[in-house]
Image (cartoon, rainbow, N blue to C red):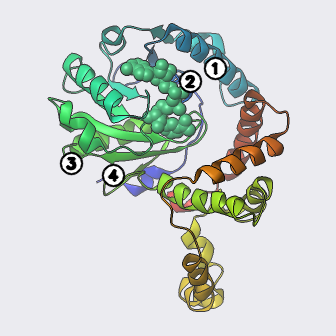
Amino acid sequence: MVAKDKRKQNWGASSPDTKGTSGEKPKKVAVIGAGTIGASWATLFAAKGRQVNLQDVEEERLDQALKAIISNLKFLTESELLNEDSTSVLKRVHPTTDLSLAVKNVEYVQESAFESYEVKKELFAQMDSICSENVILASSSSGLLMSEIQKVAKSPERCIIAHPFNPPHLIPLVELVPGKRTSEETIETAYRFHRMMGKTPLRVRKEVPGYVANRLCAALWREAIDLVHKEIASVEDVDLAVCRGPGLRWAFMGPHITYHLGGGSGGIQEFIEHIGPTFESCWGSMSSWTSIPPSALKKVVKGLEEEVEKRNLEELARWRDAKLVKILKTISDDSPFTQ
Ligand SMILES: NC(=O)c1ccc[n+]([C@@H]2O[C@H](COP(=O)([O-])OP(=O)(O)OC[C@H]3O[C@@H](n4cnc5c(N)ncnc54)[C@H](O)[C@@H]3O)[C@@H](O)[C@H]2O)c1
């Protein structure tokens, strides 16, 4: 079993860890798919001292990813999170379009290609046939089931989901979700690897679509969309209601502890008795659709354009990252419930 005391949060990039998961010699990792998530994983792994083979089927995506990595490293340096010269970190990233080359002699693979069973199964079949049996094959998937993906592998026991939150080089959580045929050893090794990379790994005990964190996000997001669709609040006001309200607490305590503190001397039990009926009336009046109504989508897109005004995606990402670092610096010494 994974020891709970190893879960102390150790976020972001700091001094390079140049040892492998077994602790002896410098190791290489591969990141397959160089989009939003792949570029961010590559930033983290390189900043933590790994040699990183970064592979994509499109040259152009590799060029874009390198630009993103340079920008991420500059940001980490400015935020005093990177102790090493960013040029030497960047030298550890090796872009290629050749999958066989990318996964050769690596200890760990983080697949971050498109979110589809078709794409992931084809990639896992290829990687499984090239990599030796002790190499962990992890997928960044946001909600697909490893039990399905690993069907194509001859060594399914080394396949696991390692689901990050965007951007993985800043947000500590990584959900480790085994498939039916994933071995205990793989879970443990992936856990140790991600701890070494400064992540907060969470082992999901049963395989469900979306795992834990995205299921929570999905519940909130459906209601956020519905409030806009029913014109109860604007896109901007729904976002404000989260960020200036409960979201402030969620950075360091989850819903269970939050409501434990809302129940007075009786804690969660008293909260459920007193405020429970209010929540029940909310649940009773909420929508339960399972695909976004097209008219809701239109309203959300329009409302979002008004909310962000003329700020482009790059500006917004920089703003997000700067805020994230401030929050992480505030909570990093204050996470007793994850220790
Ligand atoms: N974007 C997010 O917020 C987020 C968060 C957590 C997890 N994820 C997951 O991470 C994965 C990647 O998402 P993303 O947002 O980076 O997508 P993206 O579209 O930005 O990048 C995907 C990349 O994979 C490449 N690719 C496609 N097929 C390939 C193949 N066969 N071999 C190699 N490269 C291939 C594409 O060229 C592209 O560059 C998905 O599984 C997604 O669900 C995304």
Sequence-wise, which precedes: disc 2 or disc 3?
2
Query: Given this view, does label 1 or label 4 mark the residue nearer the observer?
Result: 1
Which numbered tag is attached to residue 2? 4
CA–CA distance between discs 2 and 1? 9 Å
Q: Position of residue 135 (x, y in %)?
A: 26, 26
SS of the residue at dot 1? helix
SS of the residue at dot 3? loop
Report the front residue among 226 and 36. Answer: 226
Sequence-wise, which precedes: disc 3 or disc 1?
1
Q: Position of residue 120 (x, y in %)?
A: 33, 30
Looking at the image, residue 157 lies above or below residue 232? above
What amino acid type is highlighted by mark number 1? Ala
- From the image, tell me which residue sits under label 1: 68
CB atoms at circles 1 and 4 under 8 Å apart? no
- From the image, tell me which residue sits under label 2: 43
CA–CA distance between discs 2 and 4? 26 Å
Looking at the image, residue 290 lies above or below residue 327? below
What amino acid type is highlighted by mark number 3? Lys
- From the image, tell me which residue sits under label 3: 180
